[in-house]
Amino acid sequence: MTTLTLRRRALPRVARTDPGLGPVGWTAIGVIALLALIAVLAPWLAPHDPNNISLLDANLGSSGDHLLGTDASGRDLLSRLLVGARSSLIGPLLVVVLATALGLTVAIVSAWLGGWVDAVVSRILDILFAFPGVLLAVLVVAVFRAGLGAAVAALVIAYIPYIARTVRSAALREKSQPYITALTIQGVGAPAICVRHILANLMPLIVAQSTLTFGYAMVDLAAVSFLGLGVQPPTADWGVMVSTGQPSILNGYPQESLYASALIVLAVGAFNILGDRFTERSQRSTR
């Protein structure tokens, strides 16, 4: 019986002993699914035009026509929160997808080739680690122009080293396993080994890291939008709403910033909880 056969036969036993995500994890999934559904259906769920200005209705409280009230420009807050879910979730999703794809490529190639290639990649990753995500986003936006695209591109560059370093370490451990040597002796090509075996066995770790990255990216993009360098007003976005609602707080109308901040905290908390659960599962699967 080969080492590869033993490895595959051990997987069902790990699955049987896996306690799962638990109630908290499934609650986080429910929150994320609800927010995603809201983002998809926002144009049909919004009771008003999110950009319709009515100065006569400025800073209204909750009513039958405006369930969550209005902002300082008389725009319906519920409509802006619903529509703002799109940019608030799509931005982090783009960051996660692009950073994960590039980070995985760098990590797998570096771990497989080793030698001077791995040394050069490690030094480049160390340099990128010196730049915080928000700072890099501010620099990129300053060079180009304010907008979601520039902020996303900057955060992709900032998050590549986090994903690449984590996956590279795990890939090096996986590469040292006996079944990799057996596959190499059997004449299986490097691309097939990396994709069908190393990458496949690292998927729990990759999913966990991507989930956590989504929460971090959401906070960073909201911060960039708060500074006026990301999504631009009057576009509905949770980070923009926290910023534009700040002056109203001093006038006794905190609802715009309060509601937007609460949704950001809710979404980031759900993704972080789910990421922690996935991380625990990936650690158990590697024992």
Image: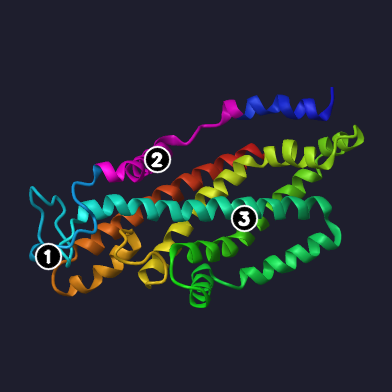
Residue 92: x, y in percent?
Answer: 47, 55
- Report how far apart the C-alphas of labels 1 and 2 lie in the structure: 39 Å
Residue 182 against residue 224 in the figure, above or below: above
- Report how far apart the C-alphas of labels 3 and 2 lie in the structure: 25 Å
| Residue count near mark 3 (Cα–Cα under 10 Å), binned few <14, some 14–19, many ≥20 | many
Camera-side residue of 14 and 180: 180
Q: Quadrant of the C terminus?
A: top right
Residue 227: x, y in percent?
Answer: 38, 73
Q: Residue at x 56, y 39 (%)?
A: 281
Kindly state the secondary structure of the residue where label 2 is placed.
Answer: helix
Mark nearer the viewer, 3 or 2 = 3
Please give left or right for residue 32 compared with residue 45 in the image: right
Residue 174: x, y in percent?
Answer: 75, 44
* Kind of residue at disc 2: Val
Residue at the spot of label 1: 58
Q: Earlier in the sequence, mark 3 or mark 2?
A: 2
Residue 106 among those drawn in magenta: no
- Residue 130 visible in rendering: yes
Residue 79: x, y in percent?
Answer: 23, 51
Q: Earlier in the sequence, mark 1 or mark 2?
A: 2
Residue 224 falls in image quadrant:
bottom left
Residue at the spot of label 3: 163
Q: Write down the region rendered in magenta.
A: 15-44
Mark nearer the viewer, 1 or 2 = 1
| Residue count near mark 2 (Cα–Cα under 10 Å), binned few <14, some 14–19, many ≥20 | few
Residue at the spot of label 2: 24
Q: Earlier in the sequence, mark 3 or mark 1?
A: 1
Q: Quadrant of the N terminus?
A: top right
* Kind of residue at disc 3: Ile
